[in-house]
Amino acid sequence: MSSSLTFDAVSHRFGAEEVLRDITLCVPESSCVALLGASGSGKSTLLRIAAGLLPPSAGQVRIDGEDVTAVEAEKRETGLVFQRPLLFPHLSVVDNVAFASRMAGGSKAESRRQAREYLELVQLADYAQRMPGQLSGGQEQRVALARALARRPRILLLDEPFSSLDLGLREDMYELLETIREQLRPTIVLVTHDRREASVLADTIAVLEHGEILQHAPVAQIHHQPASPAVNRILGGLN
Ligand code: ADP
Ligand code: MG
């Protein structure tokens, strides 16, 4: 379940404010890029554009060469996980996940079966009948991940998914993401302002400042050969 994702000269304005400037970035199939930048640098906007939720002011995002804005919402092959999980409060855990699976085109029975499979993957099989209000923050975030996976996305877009969790839980989530990468091999964009998280989880890091990519390089290279003092500052100063 994988694909390449490319940003081709993407710019975006909110009114007079230029939030993204000429972003060109290629994320190869099954790789993981971390978008690292301070709050307000444009990370979430770039992710919303990649998800097809926001048409860019200029440029294009393509999945396997196809413009994401040309694809209907139900057919988009991206899964998005937000900083806050946003589960349906009136649906049980398994129904939250099955709902996403149904949206992706499964039958009712098939969706429930798949939902249970994904809950097993995120190690929440025993919590299937609980309501979201009965879960801890870390468990909710796992359900959100299972729900994103249930859409069988080729591209997984993660917007600071672990930032509200304490350190121990975050380490568990890192392991889970590794498992997902091994088993499902999606192409991943991980938005974070945590340099360590970016280094542990991603293959490459794209450093963003004021809507511009200052450098995009493999993790080791970005640490050993920062392209500018600004990159160095961002790598050193964000947490
Ligand atoms: P980040 O995720 O890196 O913190 P965002 O993409 O959320 O950054 O925001 C980048 C800039 O765009 C900020 O200055 C923010 O205030 C502005 N912005 C984000 N969303 C909107 C919106 N819907 N309308 C107007 N301005 C927005
Ligand atoms: Mg954000």
Image (cartoon, grey):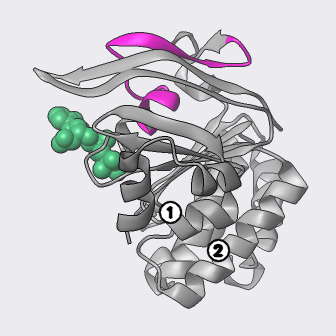
Q: Is mark 2 within 8 Å of ligand 2?
A: no
Specify the segment rendered in magenta. Answer: 47-65
**Residue tagged 2:** 173
Residue 174 magenta = no
Q: Secondary structure at mark 2?
A: helix
Q: Which image quarter: residue 217?
A: top right
From where the camera sits, is residue 179 visible? yes
Q: Please identify the quadrant where the C terminus is shown.
A: bottom left
Q: Say which amino acid is labelled 2.
A: Met
Q: Which residue is at 71% across, 79% downward? A: 124
Residue 61 magenta = yes
The label on residue 10 is none
Horizontal placement of 47 versus 205: left or right?
A: left
Check disc 2: other Cα within 10 Å, few if <14, some if 14-19, many if 20+.
many
Q: Position of residue 134 (x, y in %)?
A: 48, 86
Answer above or below: position of 144 versus 107.
below
Horizontal placement of 49 versus 173: left or right?
A: left
Q: Secondary structure at mark 1?
A: loop
